[in-house]
Amino acid sequence: MRLSWWLQPLGVAGCAVALLTALRPGAVGAAVIIAVAVIVAWRISPLHRSPGMTHAEAVHRAGADGAVVVYWRPGCPFCARLRRGLGTRRHEVLWVNIWADEDAAAFVRSVNDGNETVPTVVIGGSEVWTNPDPRRVRDALPAVR
């Protein structure tokens, strides 16, 4: 794993330390700050693996029913923005973690000039968008169902 993958979780830990130092909360306040920092750091760390599927499974499903596939990685703010932007419709999308599947990472590099730029979205098995606006992906969902 690269050191850069840990910068955001380390930043969260640093902010928690700064808050604890500046606010000097009591035991309960300190516990709340620490708990929130640990949860956020875990969610954006490279160790957190959200449920998803492999590249091979996603390609098969997209070919069979024209599903929308999102290639992502933990800790990516653009991926988090897309997930939030899809709202309740995020469950209609197939999520493939490029850190958990080397074939997925290779695919993303193949369509992004050798870069692992995420989110990379595949619509209907053929149309590829890199870091699209969440509204654009939401608008594409009914068209491929």
Image: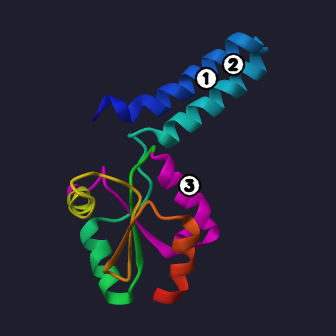
In the image, residue 46 sits, relative to residue 114, either above or below, namely: above
| Mark 3, residue position | 81
Q: Is mark 1 in CB contact (under 8 Å) with mark 3?
A: no
Q: Is residue 93 magenta?
A: yes
Amino acid of disc 1: Cys
Judged from the image, the secondary structure of the residue bearing numbered disc 1 is helix
Residue 98 x %, y %: 31, 55
Q: Is residue 145 visible?
A: no
Q: Nearer the viewer, residue 38 or 9?
A: 9
Left or right: where 72 falls relative to 136: left
As drawn, the label of residue 19 is 2
| Mark 1, residue position | 15
Which residues, given as a range, are shown in magenta? 76-102
Q: Is residue 120 magenta?
A: no
Residue 21 x %, y %: 68, 10
Residue 69 x %, y %: 39, 71
